[in-house]
Image (tube, grey):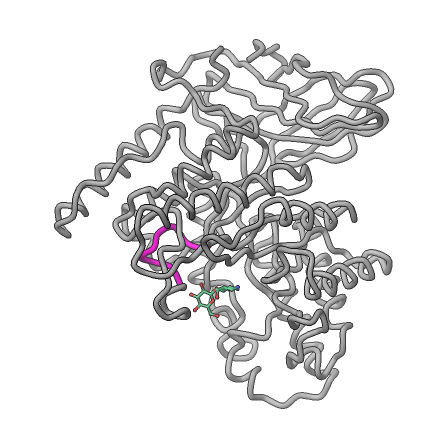
C-alpha cells in the first residue's frame, strides 16, 4: 500500500533540475543527464528519520543546477568553507558572516537543517591567529570568544556544530595544534562549554577523519569523549568524516565502530563522506564505488543513534579530492555534468532498505485536506524501542503538532526533529524551528526513543487534533 506521496513542490523542483541540467548539457556539448530518482534522496531519508546532507560551496548556489540539486536532494547542508575561522574572523574581532548567512538563508528557504563546520581547528586559521603570539590566557579568551560569537550568531539556526575538528594524531595522541600546545587538552572542554552556553539547543560534535574503524586514532577519540562525558562536559555527538577509497571500505567494521561510540549515549554521524578512485573512472570502478557508498550508508542506518549522512560535495566537478590527491577523483554521487552516478542510487537504495518509502511513481497526485501516518518501530528490545514517524499532510502547514499514545509504563526517552513532551501516556510533538513549514502533500518526519518498554508498531497518530489514516 502507498504510504507516502511526493509533494507537487518537490516534483516541480526536480523537473527544474532535469531541465537546467539538460540546458547545461546543451551548453557544454555533453549528453543530457538522466533524471534523479523519484522520490528524491531527501524524501526517502526523511521517512527513515535520518538526515541526508551535503557540503555546500555557497559561491555555487547561484548555479541553478547545483542549487536545485542541493535543495531537492538534501535536507541538511554543511558549509564547505564559509563557516571556518579564516572565513568568519579574518581580522581579530572583525567578523564576516556573508557566506554563512547565505547558506543559512538557503537552508531556511528550503526547510533544511544546517550542520555548522567548524569552530576550533588547527587548519584554515586566519593569519593573525596562526602567526600571532599570545599569552595562554589571551589565547583561551580568543578561542572562547570566537566560539561564543559564532554560535550566538546562528543560535536556533544551526542544529549541529563541529565544535572541535581533527584534534588527533594517527597514533591516538592529541595533535600539537596551537591550542593544544599552549592550553593543553582543556581547550577541548572549554570550547564545548562556550558553545553550549551560546546555544543550549545545538548539538555539539567532535569530528575527525581516519576514525571510521576501530584503530589507534579512534581509540584515542573514544578515550577522550568518555573522559569528557565523565567530567560532565557538554558533548552530544561524534562525527566520522569518511573520506574513503573505492574498494577499501569495510561496512561491518564501520558499523561496529559507530556502535561503540553510540553505546556511550552519544549521537554519531557520517559527516564528510566521499569515496575516491584512481582516474580515469570506468563503469566497474563506479559500480564498486556504489557498493562502497551503500556499505557506509548501511553502517549508519544500522545504528539507531546515527542521525544522518553528509556527503562532501555534490558533484565530481566541485570536489576537493583532485586538488589534493594527484590522479584521483570522481569521489561524489553526481558526476562532472551533474548526472547522478550509481553511488547516488546506492545511497537512495540504502534508505529505502532501511524503511524509507520509495513512493509510487504511478500515483503522483498529492491528496488534499487529510493526513496519514506511518508509525514504525524500527528497533525494539525489552526495555525500549526506536520509532520513526512519517505524517503526510493534505494541507499546507506553517507549524504543526502531532500526538499519539504510548503503552502504559512506556515513556519517551528522547526525540529528534521536533519538540517532545509527555503527559500520562500521550506524547505531543511540535515542529522544530526548521521543519514547521510543510507544503500540501508534503511529509513531516520525526523520531524518538522509548524507555520502560517498547512502542507499538502502527500506533495511530493525530495531526492538529485530527486522527490520521494509517499508512
Ligand atoms: O573541502 C574543503 C576544501 O575546499 C578546502 O580547501 C579544505 C581546506 O583545508 O578543506 C576541505 O574540507 C575539509 C574539511 O573542512 C575537514 N575535513 C577534511 C575536508 C577535506 O579536506
Above or below, 360 against 171 in this view is above
Q: Where is residue 296 in the image (x, y as percent from the top left)?
A: 55, 45
Residue pictured at 78% horizontal, 72% vertical: 186
Which residue sits furthest bottom?
Answer: 133
Residue 278, placed above or below residue 108: below
Q: In this view, does 262 lie above or below 410?
A: below
**Which residue occupies the foreground of this view, 445 or 314?**
314
Q: Main secondary structure of the magenta part?
A: loop
Instruction: Report the residue at 35% width, 24% height from top.
Output: 8
Q: Is residue 292 covered in magenta? A: no
**Quadrant of the image occupied by residue 194:** bottom right
Q: Is 365 on the left-hand or right-hand side of 394? A: left
Q: Residue 281: where, in percent of width, then height?
A: 31, 54
Rendered view: 250 above or below 405: below
Identify which residue is drawn at 43% across, 61% down. Answer: 99
Front position in the image: 383 or 67: 383
Residue 386 falls in which quadrant of the image?
Answer: top right
Residue 411 position within the rendered picture, expressed as x and y whole percent measured from the top left? 82, 26
Instruction: Name the residue: 64% across, 66% down.
Output: 147
Q: Where is residue 145 in the image (x, y as percent from the top left)?
A: 65, 71
Where, quadrant-wise, is the C terminus in this rendering?
top right
Q: Which region of the structure is painted magenta? A: 312-320
Amino acid at each position: 500500500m502507498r504510504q507516502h506521496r511526493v509533494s507537487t513542490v518537490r516534483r516541480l523542483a526536480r523537473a527544474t533540475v532535469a531541465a537546467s541540467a539538460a540546458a547545461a548539457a546543451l551548453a557544454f556539448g555533453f549528453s543530457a543527464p538522466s533524471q534523479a530518482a523519484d522520490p528524491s534522496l531527501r524524501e526517502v531519508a526523511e521517512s527513515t528519520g535520518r538526515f541526508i546532507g551535503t557540503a555546500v560551496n555557497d559561491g555555487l548556489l547561484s548555479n541553478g543546477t547545483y542549487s536545485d540539486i542541493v535543495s531537492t536532494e538534501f535536507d541538511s547542508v554543511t558549509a564547505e568553507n564559509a563557516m571556518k575561522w579564516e572565513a568568519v574572523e579574518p581580522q581579530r574581532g572583525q567578523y564576516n558572516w556573508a557566506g554563512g548567512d547565505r547558506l543559512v538563508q538557503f537552508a531556511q528557504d528550503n526547510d533544511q537543517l544546517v550542520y555548522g563546520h567548524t569552530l576550533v581547528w588547527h587548519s584554515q586559521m586566519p593569519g593573525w591567529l596562526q602567526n600571532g603570539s599570545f599569552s595562554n590566557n589571551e589565547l583561551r579568551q580568543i578561542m572562547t570568544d570566537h566560539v561564543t560569537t559564532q554560535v550566538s550568531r546562528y543560535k536556533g539556526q544551526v542544529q549541529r556544530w563541529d565544535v572541535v575538528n581533527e584534534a588527533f594524531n594517527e597514533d591516538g595522541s592529541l595533535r600539537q595544534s596551537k591550542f593544544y600546545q599552549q592550553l593543553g587538552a582543556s581547550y577541548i572542554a572549554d570550547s564545548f562549554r562556550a558553545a553550549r552556553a551560546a546555544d543550549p539547543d545545538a548539538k555539539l560534535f567532535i569530528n575527525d577523519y581516519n576514525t571510521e574503524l576501530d584503530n589507534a586514532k579512534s581509540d584515542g577519540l573514544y578515550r577522550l569523549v568518555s573522559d569528557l562525558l565523565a567530567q560532565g562536559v557538554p558533548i552530544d555527538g561524534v562525527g566520522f568524516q569518511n573520506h574513503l577509497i573505492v574498494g577499501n571500505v569495510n561496512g561491518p567494521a564501520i558499523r561496529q565502530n559507530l556502535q561503540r561510540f553510540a553505546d556511550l549515549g552519544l549521537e554519531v554521524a557520517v559527516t564528510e563522506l566521499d569515496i575516491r578512485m584512481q582516474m580515469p573512472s570506468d563503469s566497474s570502478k563506479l559500480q564498486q564505488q556504489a557498493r562502497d557508498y551503500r556499505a557506509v550508508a548501511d553502517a549508519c542506518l544500522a545504528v539507531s543513534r546515527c542521525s544522518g549522512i553528509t556527503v562532501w560535495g555534490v558533484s565530481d566537478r566541485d570536489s576537493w579530492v583532485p586538488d589534493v590527491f594527484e590522479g584521483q577523483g570522481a569521489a561524489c554521487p553526481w558526476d562532472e555534468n551533474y548526472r547522478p552516478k550509481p553511488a547516488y542510487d546506492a545511497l537512495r537504495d540504502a534508505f529505502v532498505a532501511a524503511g524509507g518509502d520509495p513512493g509510487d511513481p504511478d500515483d503522483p497526485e498529492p491528496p488534499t485536506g487529510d493526513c496519514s501516518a506511518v508509525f514504525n518501530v524500527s528497533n525494539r528490545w525489552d526495555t525500549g524501542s526506536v520509532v520513526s514517524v512519517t505524517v503526510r499532510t493534505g494541507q499546507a502547514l506553517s507549524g504543526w503538532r502531532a500526538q499519539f499514545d504510548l503503552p502504559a509504563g512506556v515513556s519517551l526517552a528522547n526525540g529528534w526533529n521536533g519538540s517532545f513532551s509527555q503527559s500520562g501516556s500521550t506524547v505531543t510533538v511540535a515542529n522544530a524551528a526548521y521543519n514547521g513549514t510543510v507544503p500540501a502533500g508534503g511529509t513531516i518526519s520525526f523520531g524518538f526513543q522509548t524507555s520502560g518498554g517498547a512502542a507499538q508498531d502502527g500506533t495511530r497518530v493525530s495531526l492538529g487534533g485530527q486522527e490520521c489514516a494509517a499508512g
